[in-house]
Image (tube, grey):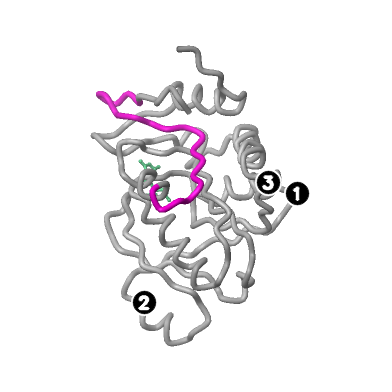
């Protein structure tokens, strides 16, 4: 079957095939362009792709999570006409009580797939205006913990979730399915179906 790919999506797929690799059965490394070295041309094209997909949703704010979501979030915010980016900060779980005591932050508990630990993510209450129309952006989607934590914070802030934009979704983990089943509009620019001996297998319908 012939599948038409947008230029940016093709560029991203080419970069994944050229420079991405897998570790074990479930870790995807794309440090060459997304997680360590940043390919700004590709990131800007990915941002424009999110704009094209979500432009009818009246997005006024982007929410992401530190650290590796920030670059893609800025590229996306620029494509939307330089709207603000808010990034959730990560703290060790032991700090939860101290953070809550101060009462300045929205908080959510997030299990980190890559670090195998629990974090508290926080956003200062004053940075999320009630009624804002927020696009959630992240570099990766695995089990959906990070995205669900951000959605939890948006609910506390009484903001709307305009959609969820993901650079690379690991289709063999359940996050994408869960979020779509909840009714969220999830746009992933690349979906990886499997890791085969260190090689990444891309889904051919995204
Ligand atoms: P989730 O919360 O959906 O399980 O995982 C998403 C978060 O974990 C993303 O913010 C991303 O930074 C990180 N992550 C999950 N899986 C991978 C992976 O295979 N490779 C990289 N580089 N990051 C990942």
What is the C-alpha distance between the residues marked 2 and 3? 39 Å
> Looking at the image, is 205 positioned above or below residue 94?
above
Viewer-nearest of labels 2 and 1? 1
Say if the magenta span includes residue 186.
yes
Asked where in the image residue 79 lies, by quadrant, the reply is top right
Say if the magenta span includes residue 83.
no
Viewer-side residue, 115 vs 192: 192
For label 1, the residue is 81
Left or right? Give the position of 6 relative to 145.
right
What is the C-alpha distance between the residues marked 2 and 1? 36 Å
Q: Main secondary structure of the magenta part?
A: strand
Relative image position of residue 174 (x, y in whole percent): 31, 44
- Of the 4 image quadrants, the one containing the N terminus is top left
Left or right? Give the position of 109 relative to 157.
left
Residue lying farthest bottom? 101
What is the C-alpha distance between the residues marked 1 and 3? 14 Å
> Looking at the image, is 105 positioned above or below residue 155?
below
Marks 1,3: beta carbons within 8 A: no
Residue lying farthest right? 81
Picture disc at residue 95 = 2
Relative image position of residue 26 (x, y in whole percent): 28, 38
Relative image position of residue 133 (x, y in whole percent): 63, 60
Left or right? Give the position of 75 relative to 10.
right
| Label 2 vs 1, first from the N-terminus | 1
Residue sitting at x 49%, y 25%: 13
Residue sitting at x 62%, y 76%: 126
Image: magenta residue range:
181-200
Viewer-nearest of labels 1 and 3? 3
Q: What element does badge 3 sit on?
A: helix
Picture disc at residue 56 = 3
Residue sitting at x 49%, y 54%: 67
Viewer-side residue, 90 vs 63: 63
């Amino acid at each position: 079957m012939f599948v038409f790919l947008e230029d940016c999506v093709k560029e991203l797929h080419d970069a994944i095939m050229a420079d991405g690799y897998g570790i074990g059965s479930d870790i995807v490394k794309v440090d060459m362009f997304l997680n360590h070295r940043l390919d700004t041309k590709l990131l800007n094209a990915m941002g424009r792709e999110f704009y094209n997909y979500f432009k009818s949703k009246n997005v006024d704010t982007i929410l992401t999570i530190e650290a590796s979501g920030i670059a893609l979030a800025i590229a996306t915010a620029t494509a939307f006409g330089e709207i603000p980016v808010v990034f959730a900060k990560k703290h060790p779980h032991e700090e939860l009580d101290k953070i809550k005591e101060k009462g300045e932050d929205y908080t959510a508990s997030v299990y980190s797939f890559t670090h195998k630990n629990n974090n508290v993510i926080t956003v200062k209450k004053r940075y999320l205006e009630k009624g804002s129309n927020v696009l959630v952006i992240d570099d990766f989607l695995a089990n959906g913990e990070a995205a669900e934590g951000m959605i939890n914070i948006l609910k506390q802030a009484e903001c709307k979730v305009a959609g969820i934009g993901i650079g690379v979704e690991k289709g063999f983990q359940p996050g994408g399915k869960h979020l779509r089943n909840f009714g969220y509009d999830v746009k992933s620019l690349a979906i990886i179906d499997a890791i085969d001996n260190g090689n990444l297998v891309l889904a051919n319908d995204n």
